[in-house]
């Protein structure tokens, strides 16, 4: 790059580029935005546009690509989606008036985590920018902000692992870290979202405090509940620094910072979210097959985002759940009233994001139109809600703080035209009567021809055949043909003599022309000024908008839960402070939605003092995973305040729900499947407590039979033993483990019943007490279409294995003898009692000194065969 001989403009470019090293710099040149050097190569590749050169033929051609300035939105969106950042370097003076090089400045930096335009955002999802800071003395902090809604929050913790866990759960679009902060190996994939900044300028303690106090206009950190959270404070400081740098605007629309109260939240870690397919299916797909799709019946983006937050972080306390549940029950019962509410909500646009764009001066005329439409709905919606009898406490409190915002609505109605132009600078924004000066200008531009005709008519009184004409060079003129043979009046000033005619102007015509020509420009300028004033005035009400946005979100969230309950025929659960979980007629909401109510078999499930851990066996495909997950989903829905897919449910509150599926394929994260399975299991064993609900689906299956069985066994024992028994649903194919029931009080066997009929198996989908008799894996393989000869061969092999190999009956016997818990400890079976691998037995018996090389080779062959 250095060897290129630089023009002054390229020097200007490089100075800008130096300031924005990891950002694609869009450099405004006339009507185009251009990218140079590596930026150009990246953009050309990612956007599939032509890469050219600024100086073709030169020794060191400068790669370049560009796009018209009015067409960049879509290109920028594509780049943001791919994780790039874009700096818009604009011309900040009129090129016609510039002396020498036009002054250029970066006016905005667009990044994936800070966009506010709807086309870049998921309407019903948050878009977070986050900052993470870890220090052995200060602890850890994680803060996140959704710039598009002004919502920000975070947490402080001593546990570094929990910090990263929350980071993954919040799924930010961008992550800010210090330059020295290492990224844990399993998060390498997130590296592309990370940008690193110096601790001193971004994560500095005192600096952060100053920035927070200034941005939030508070006197002390205590006002934001940040006073004893030094690491979190630094993260907030980093977020503000980054936002100031990228937005280059005031951050007034940020709401007061609210730290996340972990103690008030039912914790669902990211693995649980994934395994229960709350937002995405296991294969990563959104939509069909997720709980979200069944649950989301919201009508507004705000309601959708609140539902998303509540589903990620349901309540833990009864005091928080009950008011929501009361309101959901109320709206559930009042079907017609709920329908009407849904219709009102349907007309409310995204108040939060509209307000953000207005405050940040990124709004378009259509944003004001949407705002006007939304506000117009509020009084009627309030009237409807106020007319409801015996409103629940939550509804009453929403009504008590209701604000129709009718003054703002009236202002918008008075100001804005019925149909608005797409951009601010083209005029046509305002309604006649709003501003006298604008009316005058509008009169001139819209009715200029009428004014001209009026002047012409007046002159024609004396000169009936006078004509009015216009040329670019001379402007408007009167034309008098020689044929008329008439003398021009005195006030006619001769401008041009033609063969057959004379052309004149008058003082009046000249004035009118001047006014007409400048009126169009003046009108645009006047409209723009008025627009800015209107924007300012509307932005001044931001707090009121944000408050009403929250009210609308709460209404929409609760009606959505009520509507889902009605649509899917769910019932109101009873929540209590005890530990028992008793579900009657429980269903899996998503499987049921896919298969239809008629095709779904409901199941009862009880976790109480007689059985805190249910060991569930049954053939493949019987429905073990389904019954496990439906119990977890029922608890989650209940703790959001919603109804549940069951005929009745009594649910002891949970503080955490863990869901693990054996050997989930996680190779993309750089760990072996078994390693992942075990680290997830380890996390449960570290974190699960008396109030937790643990769902373990075939833990241990990702390794050899003995290792897997032993681990599953030990984990089950630990969960039953700990704190009097942790509520656990444990599905397994290790039938041997069913013997634990005899030894472990608190562990109960259940199986999903099947029936054999004429050599076929019929899935009954019923959860019944007792162990399953065997696995039926081969039968299921046949059902799945494995060719008959292979199935027959598998049966033969199974018969041989059952006769010769260390058999499961023996292991079961072993477990029932050895699984005692003396002093509540665990006793592993003595090694010699486990049946040994025949290769090992042979190895032990072998005298190596007497072995010929040939024999050794033969033996090796045999063993290899035995090992398969
Ligand atoms: N209660 C039910 N009513 C109707 N269909 C059900 C029910 N439970 C499960 N199913 C159906 O059976 C399929 C298999 O269920 P599931 O995956 O829970 O079986 P599984 O026992 O965990 O199998 P595997 O051991 O092979 O993992 C589900 O996808 C669903 O279509």
Image (cartoon, grey):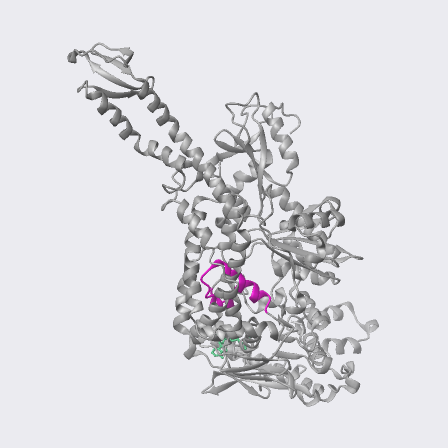
- The percent position of residue 617, horizontal first and vertical second, equals 59, 82
**227 in relation to 643, above or below:** above
Magenta residue check for 312: yes
Which of the 4 image quadrants contains residue 154? bottom right
Magenta residue check for 47: no
Tell me which residue sits at (44%, 68%) in the image.
386
Q: In the visual, does 677 lie left or right of 450?
A: right
- The percent position of residue 330, horizontal first and vertical second, equals 47, 75
Front position in the image: 547 or 250: 547
On-image quarter of the C terminus: bottom right
On-image quarter of the N terminus: top right
> From this viewpoint, is residue 516 visible?
yes
Q: How many marks?
A: 0
Judged by its main secondary structure, the magenta piece is: helix
**Which span is picked out in magenta?**
288-314
Name the outermost residue toward the right.
849
**698 in relation to 342, above or below:** below
- The percent position of residue 407, horizontal first and vertical second, equals 46, 52
**481 in relation to 80, above or below:** above
Front position in the image: 711 or 851: 711
- The percent position of residue 190, horizontal first and vertical second, equals 63, 54
Q: In the visual, does 449 lie left or right of 106?
A: left
Front position in the image: 123 or 618: 123
Tell me which residue sits at (49%, 73%) in the image.
328
């Amino acid at each position: 790059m250095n060897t290129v001989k630089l023009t002054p403009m390229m020097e200007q470019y490089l100075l800008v580029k130096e300031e924005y090293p990891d950002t694609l710099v869009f450099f405004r040149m006339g009507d185009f935005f251009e990218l140079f050097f590596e930026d150009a190569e990246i953009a050309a590749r990612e956007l599939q546009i032509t890469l050219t050169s600024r100086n073709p033929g030169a020794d060191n051609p400068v790669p370049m690509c560009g796009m018209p300035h009015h067409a960049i939105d879509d290109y920028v969106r594509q780049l943001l989606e791919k994780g790039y950042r874009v700096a818009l370097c604009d011309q900040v003076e009129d090129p016609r008036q510039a002396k020498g090089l036009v002054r250029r400045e970066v006016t905005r930096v667009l990044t994936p985590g800070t966009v506010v335009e709807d086309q870049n955002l998921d309407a019903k999802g948050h878009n977070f920018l986050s900052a993470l800071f870890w220090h052995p003395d200060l602890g850890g902090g994680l803060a996140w902000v959704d710039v598009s809604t002004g919502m920000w929050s975070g947490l402080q913790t001593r546990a570094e692992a929990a910090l990263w866990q929350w980071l993954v759960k919040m799924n930010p679009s961008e992550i800010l870290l210090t330059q020295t902060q290492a990224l844990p190996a399993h998060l390498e994939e997130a590296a592309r979202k990370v940008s690193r900044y110096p601790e001193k300028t971004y994560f500095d303690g005192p600096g952060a405090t100053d920035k927070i106090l200034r941005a939030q206009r508070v006197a002390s950190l205590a006002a934001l509940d940040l006073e004893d959270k030094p690491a979190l404070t630094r993260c907030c400081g980093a977020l503000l620094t980054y936002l100031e740098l990228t937005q280059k605007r005031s951050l007034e629309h940020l709401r007061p910072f609210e730290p996340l109260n972990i103690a008030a939240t039912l914790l669902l870690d990211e693995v649980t979210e994934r395994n229960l397919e709350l937002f995405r299916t296991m294969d990563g797909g959104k939509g069909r097959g997720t709980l979200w799709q069944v649950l989301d019946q919201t009508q507004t983006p705000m309601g959708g985002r609140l539902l998303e937050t509540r589903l990620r972080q349901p309540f833990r306390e009864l005091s928080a759940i009950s008011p929501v549940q009361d309101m959901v029950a109320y709206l559930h019962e009042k079907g017609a009233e709920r329908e009407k509410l849904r219709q009102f909500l349907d007309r409310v646009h995204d108040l939060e994001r509209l307000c953000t764009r207005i405050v940040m001066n990124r709004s378009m005329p259509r944003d004001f139109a949407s705002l006007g439409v939304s506000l117009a709905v509020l009084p009627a919606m309030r009237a409807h809600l106020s007319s409801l009898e015996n409103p629940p406490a939550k509804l009453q409190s929403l009504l008590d703080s209701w604000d129709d915002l009718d003054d703002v609505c009236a202002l918008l109605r008075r100001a804005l035209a019925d149909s608005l132009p797409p951009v601010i600078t083209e005029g046509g924004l305002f309604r006649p009567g709003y501003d006298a000066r604008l009316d005058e200008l509008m009169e001139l531009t819209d009715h200029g021809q009428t004014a001209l005709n009026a002047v012409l008519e007046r002159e024609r009184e004396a000169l009936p055949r006078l004509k009015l004409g216009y040329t670019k060079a001379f402007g408007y003129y009167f034309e008098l043909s020689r044929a008329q043979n008439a003398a021009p009046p005195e006030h006619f000033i001769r401008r041009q003599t033609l063969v057959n005619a004379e052309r004149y102007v008058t003082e009046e015509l000249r004035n009118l022309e001047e006014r007409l020509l400048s009126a169009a420009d003046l009108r645009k300028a006047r409209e723009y000024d008025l627009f800015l004033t209107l924007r300012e005035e509307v932005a001044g009400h931001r707090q009121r908008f944000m408050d009403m946005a929250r009210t609308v979100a709460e209404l929409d969230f609760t009606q959505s839960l009520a509507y889902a309950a009605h649509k899917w025929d769910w019932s109101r659960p009873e929540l209590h402070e005890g530990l028992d979980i008793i579900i009657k007629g429980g269903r899996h909401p998503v499987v049921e939605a896919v298969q239809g109510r008629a095709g779904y078999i409901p199941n009862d499930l009880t976790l109480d003092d007689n059985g805190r851990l249910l060991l569930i066996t049954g053939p493949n495909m019987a429905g073990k995973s389904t019954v496990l997950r439906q119990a977890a989903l029922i608890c989650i829905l209940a703790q959001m305040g919603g109804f549940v897919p069951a005929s009745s449910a009594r649910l002891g509150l949970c503080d955490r729900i863990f869901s693990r599926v054996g050997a989930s394929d996680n190779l993309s994260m750089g760990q072996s499947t078994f390693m992942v399975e075990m680290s997830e299991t380890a996390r449960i064993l570290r974190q699960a407590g008396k109030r937790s609900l643990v769902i373990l689906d075939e833990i241990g299956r990702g390794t050899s039979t003995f290792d897997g069985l032993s681990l599953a066994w030990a984990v089950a024992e630990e969960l039953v033993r700990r704190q009097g028994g942790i509520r656990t649903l444990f599905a397994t194919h290790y039938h041997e483990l069913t013997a634990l029931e005899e030894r472990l009080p608190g562990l109960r066997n259940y199986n999903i019943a099947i029936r054999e009929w004429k050599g076929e198996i019929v899935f009954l989908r019923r959860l019944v007490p007792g162990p399953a008799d065997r696995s039926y894996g081969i039968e299921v393989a046949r059902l799945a279409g494995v060719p008959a000869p292979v199935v027959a061969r598998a049966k033969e092999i199974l018969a041989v294995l059952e006769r010769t190999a260390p058999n499961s009956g023996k292991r079961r016997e072993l477990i029932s003898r050895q699984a005692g818990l003396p002093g509540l400890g665990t006793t592993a079976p003595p090694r010699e009692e486990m049946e040994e691998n025949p290769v090992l037995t042979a190895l032990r018996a072998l005298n190596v000194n007497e072995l010929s090389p040939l024999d050794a080779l033969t033996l090796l062959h045999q063993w290899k065969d035995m090992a398969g």
